[in-house]
Image: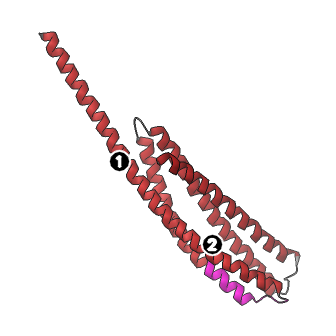
């Protein structure tokens, strides 16, 4: 009889323990799902801001091509375009800060997760950090591009529009544009991996 009571006591304790563990895991998974939604939301806001900038950037490319084909580029028009792009980049930077904050919180929850799903959560956190970093690289490349183009305009206004330095600034701007495009491509690939695991 005592053995029977001991058995049921142990069985009851094990059942309570299992229930506690499964409930704890459920809570953490719910936390992770909540953080994923936050990341998705901030990512969409960031991407919308990026798309808006790219639209302005594309219009600017046409404008730059027109001015560079002329004998004397209108530097006032070019500086206005740079200022317009800088305004959009400021908005993009603000959206990126929110994205980075959400990625950090997701990573923290993923690290503390126990039981099933932890490996995928850790892998997701890694890819989200890659997305965050590559978008930061793209943003900095765009900022660097505008700096190079501003230096080119300085050369033009000083009467050195055909100088080696002026051409180097233009080439630097083109290189940074390609760097930004590559970073965005790597970022999108990383987020696609995370999203595939999440679903």
Q: Residues within 10 Å of mark 1 (few under 14, many from 20)?
A: few
Residue at 62%, 72% (x, y): give it: 54
> Residue 76: x percent and y percent?
71, 89
Q: Quadrant of residue 132?
A: bottom right
Residue 119 location in percent, x, y?
Answer: 49, 38
> Is residue 33 visible in the rendered structure shown here?
yes
Viewer-closest of 151 and 52: 52
Is residue 83 a member of the stretch shown in magenta?
yes
The residue that mark 1 highlights is: 30
Q: Where 22 falls versus 189 (above or below)?
A: above
Q: Residues within 10 Å of mark 2 (few under 14, many from 20)?
A: some
Location of mark 2 (residue): 54
Look at 49% across and 67% down and name the residue there. 45
Q: Is the residue 141 above or below the residue 196 in the image?
A: below
Instruction: Name the quarter where the N terminus is drawn.
Output: top left
Compared across the picture, whether 199 is left or right of 127 comes to left
Q: Residue, x 40% and y 48% (percent of image)?
A: 32
For label 2, the SS is: helix
Examine the rendering and report whether any part of residue 89 can be seen: no
Q: Is residue 96 magenta?
A: no
Left or right of 61: which side holds 163? right
Mark-to-mark CA distance, 1 and 2: 36 Å
Give the numbered dot on residue 112.
Answer: none
Q: Position of residue 77 (x, y in %)?
A: 70, 88
Count of numbered labels shown in the rendering: 2
- Residue 65: give x, y in percent of width and height: 77, 81
Q: Main secondary structure of the magenta part?
A: helix
Q: Residue furthest left?
A: 1
Residue 110's place in the image compared with 82, above or below, is: above
- Write the start and end of the magenta stretch as one range: 71-85
């Amino acid at each position: 009889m005592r053995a029977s009571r001991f058995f049921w006591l142990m069985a009851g304790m094990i059942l309570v323990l299992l229930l506690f563990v499964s409930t704890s895991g459920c809570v953490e998974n719910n936390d992770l799902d909540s953080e994923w939604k936050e990341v998705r939301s901030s990512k969409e806001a960031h991407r919308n801001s990026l798309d808006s900038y790219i639209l302005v950037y594309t219009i600017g490319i046409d404008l730059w091509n027109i001015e560079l084909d002329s004998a004397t580029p209108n530097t006032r028009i070019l500086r206005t375009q740079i200022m317009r792009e800088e305004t959009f980049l400021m908005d993009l930077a603000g959206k990126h800060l929110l994205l980075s904050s959400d990625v950090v919180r997701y990573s923290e929850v993923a690290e503390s997760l126990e039981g099933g799903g932890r490996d995928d959560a850790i892998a997701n956190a890694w890819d989200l950090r890659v997305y965050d970093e590559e978008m930061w690289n793209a943003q900095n490349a765009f900022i660097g591009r505008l700096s190079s183009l501003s230096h080119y305009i300085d050369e033009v206004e000083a009467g050195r529009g055909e100088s080696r330095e002026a051409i180097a600034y233009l080439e630097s701007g083109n290189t940074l544009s390609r760097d930004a495009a590559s970073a965005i491509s790597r970022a999108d690939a990383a987020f696609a991996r995370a999203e595939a695991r999440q679903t």
